[in-house]
Amino acid sequence: MAVITVRNLDDEVQRRIKVRAAAHHHSMEAEARAILSAAVSGGDFGRAWVREFRESPDVDLVLPERSTPRRLDFE
């Protein structure tokens, strides 16, 4: 397996990876591997998203309230 080093990583990016890793009960290294693997997985975003949240049932998604749809008049 290859080893890479990421230099000059922004502090905020590192903080977010650390928070995400803790939420997934992973180390930062394992979380970085998961993020990189998902990023190059061939565009299967939907399945990756479902898998991500299935593995983290304690994550609550807040959905915005929706307004009443506008009626369209094509005449």
Image (tube, helix red, strand yellow):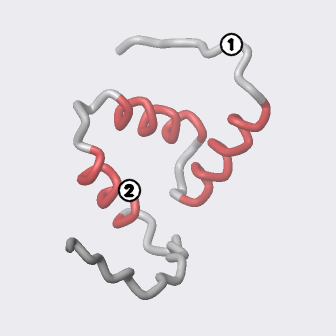
Q: Name, please, the residue furthest toward the right.
A: 11
Residue located at (60% from left, 39% from top): 28
Numbered badge on residue 52:
2
Residue 21 placement (x, y as % from top left):
58, 49
Instruction: Give the side of residue 3 with respect to residue 46, left or right.
Output: right
Callout 1, which amino acid?
A: Arg
Quadrant in the rendering for residue 8? top right
What is the secondary structure assignment of the residue under circle 1?
A: loop
Quadrant in the rendering for residue 18? top right
Callout 2, which amino acid?
A: Glu
Residue located at (54% from left, 57% from top): 25
Residue nearer the viewer, 67 or 30: 67
Q: Residues within 10 Å of mark 2 (few under 14, many from 20)?
A: some
How far apart are the alpha carbons under marks 2 and 1? 26 Å
Q: Name, please, the residue furthest toward the front.
A: 75
Asked if 53 appears above or below 68 in the picture, the reply is above
Asked if 2 appears above or below 16 in the picture, the reply is above
Numbered badge on residue 7:
1
Residue located at (54% from left, 76% from top): 62
Q: Residues within 10 Å of mark 1 (few under 14, many from 20)?
A: few
On the rendered image, what quadrant is the N terminus found in?
top left
Residue located at (27% from left, 53% from top): 46
Mark 2 / mark 1, whichever is N-terminal:
1
Give the mark count: 2
